Image (cartoon, rainbow, N blue to C red):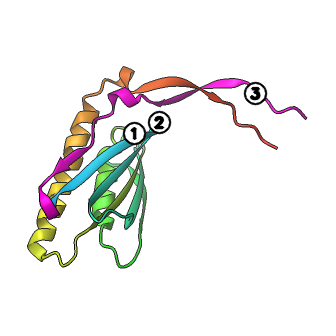
Amino acid sequence: MAISQARTKAVAWDPAVLPAPVRVGRGRLAVTAAVQAVGTDLLLTVTGGQAHAGATAVVAPAAGRRQGFGRLAVVPPHKEGPLAEAGALRIAGAAGCVCVAGIHQDAATPQEIKVIVANARAAIDRLAAALAGVPADQRYCRASVPKPSTP
């Protein structure tokens, strides 16, 4: 059986319309949020300090609903779950979203944690505002990609 080499058109976010990563805060309180296209979906990463993947939230936009729906996974003992979920919900209005959050600062005080979380939320809000400003007809592009073959 011959493997098909036919090409098809895939719809994906146009990288040219995606906002640049946003960094909020300074020093050990700095947080960076960035979006990356994954086809018609977006991957949001929220990192700071020693970056890692402590929690993941997957959210799909829900037609006619104020918020999307999805799932959250947190690797114990990490505490980024609520932040990953809030970030994914915030960005999901633009497209389906996966948010991976990982922020670690050794010996962070409760006050520092509050500032770090506020910085993360501010960075996510800035990305969401930038994405909301992209006209619907400019969000996606069509790129030729190899047609997947099945054995």
* Quadrant of the image containing the C terminus: top right
Q: Amino acid at mark 2?
A: Thr
User: What residue is rendered at 33% in x and 74% in y?
Assistant: 78
Distance between the alpha carbons at the discs numbered 2 and 3: 23 Å
Q: Position of residue 102 (x, y in %)?
A: 32, 63
Left or right: residue 102 versus residue 108 is right
For disc 3, the marked residue is 5
Q: Is residue 66 something one can see in this rendering?
A: no
For disc 1, the marked residue is 95
Distance between the alpha carbons at the discs numbered 2 and 1: 7 Å
Tag 2 near tag 3, CB within 8 Å: no
Q: Amino acid at mark 1?
A: Ala
Q: Position of residue 145 (x, y in %)?
A: 61, 29
Residue 3 is one of the magenta-drawn residues: yes
Q: Is residue 94 something one can see in this rendering?
A: yes
Tag 2 near tag 1, CB within 8 Å: yes
For the magenta stretch, what is the residue range? 1-28
Callout 2: helix, strand or loop? loop
Number of residues whose C-alpha sits closer than 10 Å to that of mark 1, classed few (under 14), some (14–19) or many (20 or more): many
User: What residue is rendered at 11% in x and 69% in y?
Assistant: 112
Q: Position of residue 67 (x, y in %)?
A: 32, 49
- First reached walking from the N terminus: tag 1 or tag 3: 3
Left or right: residue 14 versus residue 20 is right
User: What residue is rendered at 41% in x and 28% in y?
Assistant: 14
Rendered view: 56 above or below 43: below
Rendered view: 92 above or below 121: above
